[in-house]
Amino acid sequence: ERERETNTTIAHVYRGTFVHSTPHTALQILEDALLGVDTEGKIAFIGKGEELNKLSQSCGFSPSEVIQLAQHEFFMPGMVDTHIHAPQYSYAGTALDLPLLQWLNTYTFPVESRFKDLEFARSVYTQVVKRTLRNGTTTACYFATIHTDASLLLGKITNDFGQRALVGKVCMDINNAVKHYKETSEESQEETCRFIAELLKKKYPLVKPVVTPRFALSCSADLLEQLGAIAKNNNLHIQSHISETIEEVNVVKKLFPDSESYTDVYLKHNLLTDKTVMAHGCHLTDEELALFRETGASLSHCPNSNISLCSGMLNVRNVLNHKVKLGLGTDVAGGYSASMLDAVRRTLDTSKVLTIQEPDYCTLSFEEVFRLATLGGSQALSMDDHTGNFEVGKDFDALRVNVAAPEGPIDLVQVDEPKILLEKFLNLGDDRNIVEVYVAGRKVVPFE
Ligand SMILES: [Zn+2]
């Protein structure tokens, strides 16, 4: 039993099964546990059910207020989507027939240019925040578009719904295909500074800005350098894309002849820090992974997107062996599903395809992928000091899962042990099983 040294009072106490990960254990199961959340939304104590009377006295709550989970229910940490394009939600589930660079020119840029229209932005951004929250994404790392005011609106909407988020105004001063969807380098820098200042001024407790160069092919060297400086001066997160397709890697090589690798392009411009998350990395070399490890930068694995756009398959085992931080991402809309449960399944699928190709490959287990979707994502976003699992002192970001939810997708034929319930939920479950979602202790699903 652990307790938090605190003067705050207990707001809620839950009793039942809790499943989560630690850095050392991919899946830890706490059966008949008691977990208390204080009025600040932090986990105040975790104990055993049999200690109810003692804990109620020492922590100051009434045993009659304890919320009891059913046998086919459990709490798990909220899922962390480390890479999602909010505007692209408007065409999710379509436009999956072209490789990356043509896909951007044909579908993405024309749609993103429409987000100058704040009412269009409001409608799409409200939909994507609600959809991801309902599906258990308690933290999302969003790309918006180049439009500062629409990006600020995304920040407001995530705050209004209570989702934890990093929000990035996209920066791009090169676009030869859709010429009206780009900025000058100066505009991009100025608008990034305005975006950061105005978002921070709102003092949203769970929403922070992230410096967002789209990727090396959309940004001049001058812009990359300035964005690196802006991130450093403001101690901000950074997000971008890297080594998604072979074609992209080859074009980067041609455009940046002085850099030793794609990773070196970002490194040279101070964009590889311990608060950087790069999407994809399918085609990174071991030398490049070593640079990620040294700088503390992380990768977002987006398997639905990587397969849908025929980009490649990230060797997650190799990334983990290099001790590079890694989380999962939906990459809507290159990935067609906004649900992190889909990201879990596609991660397992990709690992199994790699095993088919190489029978000695050490396939990822569902427990490991569960950790990647939760604690791994928090680590990748450098938020694991206050989110990612159930530790006393951390924020209570959690999903109440009912595996036997009425009208749900899972039929239980017997009383299964928690590990089986979790495996069934990860493989078969959907938002009908996610009956409540909590972010920093606040119940954000069902919507008020
Ligand atoms: Zn992306």
Image (cartoon, grey):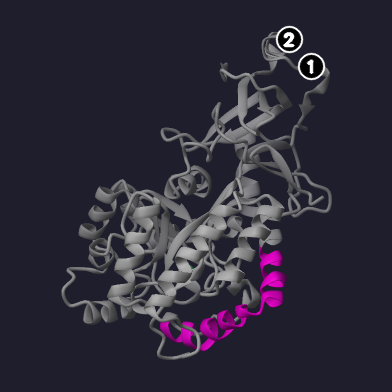
Does any atom of ligand 1 lie closer than 8 Å to the CB of label 1?
Answer: no
- Residue 370 lies, in percent from the top left, at 53, 46
Q: Is residue 281 visible?
A: no
Residue 181 versus residue 32 in the image, above or below? below
The answer to whether 221 appears left or right of 7 in the picture is: left
Q: Which disc is residue 218 wearing?
A: none
Residue 120 versus residue 373 in the image, above or below? below
> Which residues, given as a range, are shown in magenta?
101-128
The answer to whether 342 appears left or right of 441 in the picture is: left
The answer to whether 353 appears left or right of 34 in the picture is: left
**Three-letter amino acid code at the position of disc 2:** Asn
Quick one: label 2, few (<14), some, or many (20+) residues within 10 Å? few
Does any atom of ligand 1 lie closer than 8 Å to the CB of label 2?
Answer: no
Q: Main secondary structure of the magenta part?
A: helix
- Mark 2: which secondary structure? helix
Query: Where does label 1 land, which residue?
Result: 63
Compute the Cα span from label 2 to label 1: 7 Å
Query: As rendered, which of 340 and 128 lies closer to the eye?
Result: 128
Label 2 with label 1: CB-CB less than 8 Å: yes
Query: As rendered, which of 234 and 348 lies closer to the eye?
Result: 234
Q: Quarter of the image for the N terminus: give it.
A: top right
Residue found at x 61% / y 82%: 114
Query: Where does label 2 land, which residue?
Result: 53
Residue 81 lies in what quarter of the image? bottom right
Residue found at x 78% / y 28%: 67
- Residue 431 lies, in percent from the top left, at 72, 54
**Three-letter amino acid code at the position of disc 1:** Pro
